[in-house]
Each structure stands twice: as structure tokens, then as C-alpha cells.
Amino acid sequence: MKEHTSILCPVDFSDASRGALRYAAAIARHFGARLITLTVENPLLTEALDLGTGIAWTPEDSRRELVKFVAGTFDRRSTAPMILEHEVAVGKPADEILRIARERPCDLIVISSHGMTGVRKLFFGSTTERVLRGTPRPVLITPATDPGPVAIEDARMVIRHVLAPVDLSDASLHQVQAARAVSQALDVPLLLAHVIEPIRSRFTARLHMPGLDAERRSTAEEALDGLVATFPRRLRAEALIAYGDPAEEIAKLIQDRHVGLVVMGLHASPRLGPRMGSVTYRVLCLAPALVLAVPPATAGAESRAADQNRAVAL
């Protein structure tokens, strides 16, 4: 059993990654977790520096810059976590982030959806997306314009509602359990939502099945009610059903219900492992909210989660 929970926060020295760092630090302080900050240097740039200036780059150069950046992120009210470590790696950012998360090992990765342009950059179309496509760990993606909280109490005021859009597949249970845990920890309402996509098929149009949508809604309502029934009574949970494009409807719910955190599930592939689906990708592009991306549970994790749920219900 690990001595400490560990959180990994990659930074690229941008304001966007500064906001992600504040979220990571607030979580680490609240749970007494170890916070590992990471910067990844491009090997071509370090070699070019050596050739162009004659000054040999060393990891300590980046480490000093990283320590300075982290120290400057926290003011008198937002203090750094008690257990704070700094890592410097050289290589492709996404590969190094996943390697460090695996080797340390880390329980959560906190990363900004976008970063700065220029020499050092973390932008959603590249690094963050690749991390999501390969991560075996949950990833908290913070909006680029979010300055981050001072403490968990500040995050609670910003989040206000947790939304878990579910496709009602078997993997939804693990996603809902994660959303429930966050909702309980922050003491904020939980919204479960399922979006029914219109059937665009000439075959079904010719059949003219007026009862099909009603049947699909009834099935979804029954499944959502079953999920809500597993929650303790003190948890403020609500089930919602919408029609239309899933990503667009989720974005509308985020705006209309003042949702600050969306818990999205990552799909599983037997060959490729966790991977980001198109709906998760589009929600990240459309919605200026925190997104917690949850990879599929292993059999052991599912068993432990089920035991925890039974204990809470009792």
C-alpha cells in the first residue's frame, strides 16, 4: 500500500498551467497528497542551445526554473502542499507525462486543456489529447482561462454542480461512482444525464415507428433511476434525459445548470487500452468547465468500488 496519494501536474510555465497547478495543489493539501510537478524539455531544443551558445543544458537548469515558477504560483493564502516534488524530463511531453505517472505511481494527473504558444507549450490538440488517449489514471483537465482556486472551499463555490453524462453502458457504473465520490467530497449536487441521439436512417424512417423514441426514453429512465437508487439518501442527485447531439446537449446542460465539473468516461479497447471518444473530445472543445476524465476500471477496482458502495448504503 502506498504511503501517500500522489498527484502529477505537468507545467509549461504558462498562465494556463499555473491555473492547473493551483487546482492540483488545492487537492493535494486537502487530501494530504504528494504533489509532483513536471516540466518536459524538447531534446532538439536542448541540443540547439548547446550548439548555438556553447552552453551545455542540464536538468538542474530547468529544475531551478520550475521551482521558481511553482513558488511564484502561490500567494500568502494559497500555500504549497506539504509534500512537493519537482521532476524534469526530456522527450515527447505526452510520453514523459504518462511515464512519470506510471513509474511514481500517481493517482491523478492535473493538466490544462491549452497552454502557451512558442517554445514551451501544452495545447489540447497535441499533448493533453495524447495524454487522454493513453492514460491509465484519471485526468483532471482545467480550462485555459481558469486561474485556479486557493483552496478546496473555493473550488466548491466554482463547481456548484457535478455532471456525469452517461451512455448507460457497463462502463458507466465506474464513471458514476467517480462522480458520486467527487460530489460527496465537495458537498455539491450531482446530475446524471443521458442524451438520446436521433435515429438518422432511411430504413427506420420507412418503418415509421412512432413508439421507438418513447421506448428508448423509458429504457433510459429505468437505467438512470437504477443508478440513482444506489446513492445514499443524503446525496442530492438528479437524473436528466435530453435529445440531440450528445456533445452539444452536454454543453447546454453545463451552461443552463451552472455546472463546474463534468465527469466523463474514457472508452476501453482490448488492444489500445483507455481512449478518448469523440463526445469527450467535443465537450472539451465546447465547454469552459473542469473535466475529470475517468479511464475504465480494472476488475479489482470495480470489486473494491462495489464494496465501498455497499458500505455507504449500509
Image (cartoon, rainbow, N blue to C red):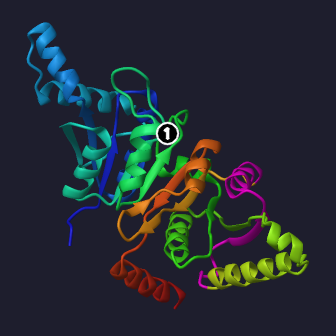
The residue drawn where x is 48% and y is 56% is 276
Q: Residue at x 23, y 50 (%)?
A: 100
Res 87 → quadrant: top left
Residue at the spot 66% in from the left edge and 85% down from the top edge: 226
Q: Nearer the viewer, residue 85 or 272?
A: 272
Depicted 62 relative to depicted 134: above or below: above
Q: Is residue 238 visible?
A: yes
In what element is the residue under mark 1?
Answer: loop
Q: Is residue 21 visible?
A: no
Point out the stretch of residues depicted in magenta.
230-256
Identify the residue at image location x=22%, y=37%. 91
Residue 306, percent across and down?
A: 45, 85
- Image coordinates of residue 20 in percent, x first then y, are 43, 40
The amino acid type found where label 1 is placed reads Gly
Given residues 263 and 67, the one toward you in this image is 263
Q: Quadrant of residue 184?
A: bottom right
Q: Is residue 63 left or right of residue 169?
A: left
Determine the image quadrant of residue 225. bottom right
Note whether 159 is above or below 3 in the view shown.
Answer: above
237 drawn magenta: yes
Q: In terms of depth relative to the viewer, which is nearer, 183 or 243?
A: 243
Q: Is residue 176 magenta?
A: no
Q: Which residue is mark 1?
A: 148
Q: Position of residue 228 (x, y in %)?
A: 65, 80
Relative depth, front residue between 3 and 97: 97
User: From this viewpoint, which residue is outermost toward the top?
Assistant: 53
Few, some or many C-alpha atoms within 10 Å of disc 1 (few <14, some 14-19, many ≥20)?
A: many
Residue 308: x and y, percent? 43, 83
For the N terminus, the quadrant is: bottom left
